[in-house]
Amino acid sequence: MAAILLIAVPIAFNVAFFELGRAFEYPAILRKEPDEILRRFNAGGSALILRWEALLVSALLMLPLAVLVAVVLGASPVLTVLSVVVGAVAALVQGLGLVRWPFAVPELARRYVAAPDGPEGDATRQTIEVVFAMLHRLLGVGIGEHLGYLFTGFWTLLVAGSILTTPVLPAWLGMVGLPIGVALLVGTLEFVGPNERDGWAVAGTIVPIAYIAWSLWLIVLGVFLLL
């Protein structure tokens, strides 16, 4: 089961991510104005919402994945417990970051598009834009990205350390995981401090590459577990 999840979860996440990119220009759409995002979201209908739900479920599947991988590797009690706890938190914060899209944003988009013309409608749309921006910054940037990168990076380092200290998988797979974990941790700095408003371009470039490498690494771990 651990091997199957190691292969299936990153594939499912990337397929859902690709579908959102194809149907909604995600993640580039996040750089657009709220007016365009909400109108395009509303136009996407239930098909777009289901794509977001698929991404949410694939992120939450990291929770059983983290537990099973820790049990299979059988590292020291400290590493095992830390891997389970940190991996579970990583799954939960990623899920919290994404849950607004299939549940909160549809309602905001409906109300935004339905707002009448005129001063009253303009005031309604401005209020919705503020709510949307707050959800995006808190759940998306703060919880989903900042905390998501943080705990996913630490979990990756813990798994890499478990591999290096046990004979279950080749040690070189643990060595490969170390720089991937560090790269994810660098991603946590994208919107921190002076970069809070516009983001740090270096981290923004590193994170997509790190997640592709992370996905491939998990798949390779799963393949080796099956051998």
Image (tube, grey):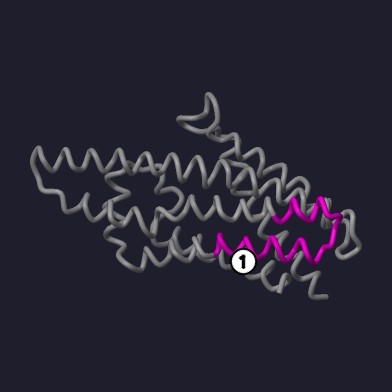
Q: Is residue 114 left or right of residue 167?
A: left
Q: Is residue 122 left or right of residue 128?
A: left
Name the residue furthest left. 118
User: Horizontal and vertical percent for residue 10?
Assistant: 62, 63
Q: Residue at x 46, y 50 (%)?
A: 27
User: Horizontal and vertical percent for residue 210?
Assistant: 65, 49
User: Horizontal and vertical percent for residue 206?
Assistant: 63, 42
In this view, the residue in front, 226 or 151, is 151
In this view, the residue in front, 26 or 188, is 188
- What type is the residue that disc 1 sits on? Val
Give the main secondary structure of the magenta stretch: helix
Q: Is residue 71 above or below residue 124?
A: below
In the picture of the structure, the residue carrying the numbered disc 1 is 9
Q: Residues within 10 Å of mark 1 (few under 14, many from 20)?
A: many
Q: Is residue 144 magenta?
A: no
Quadrant in the picture for residue 52? bottom left
Q: Which SS class for mark 1? A: helix
Q: Quadrant of the C terminus?
A: bottom right
Quadrant in the picture for residue 48? bottom left
Q: Which stretch appears magenta?
A: 58-84
Quadrant in the picture for residue 130? top left
Q: Quadrant of the N terminus?
A: bottom right
Q: Residue at x 30, y 65 (%)?
A: 45
User: Horizontal and vertical percent for residue 80?
Assistant: 79, 56
Q: Is residue 69 above or below residue 92?
A: below
In this view, the residue in front, 9 or 84, is 84
Q: Residue at x 37, y 39 (%)?
A: 134
Q: Residue at x 64, y 56 (%)?
A: 88
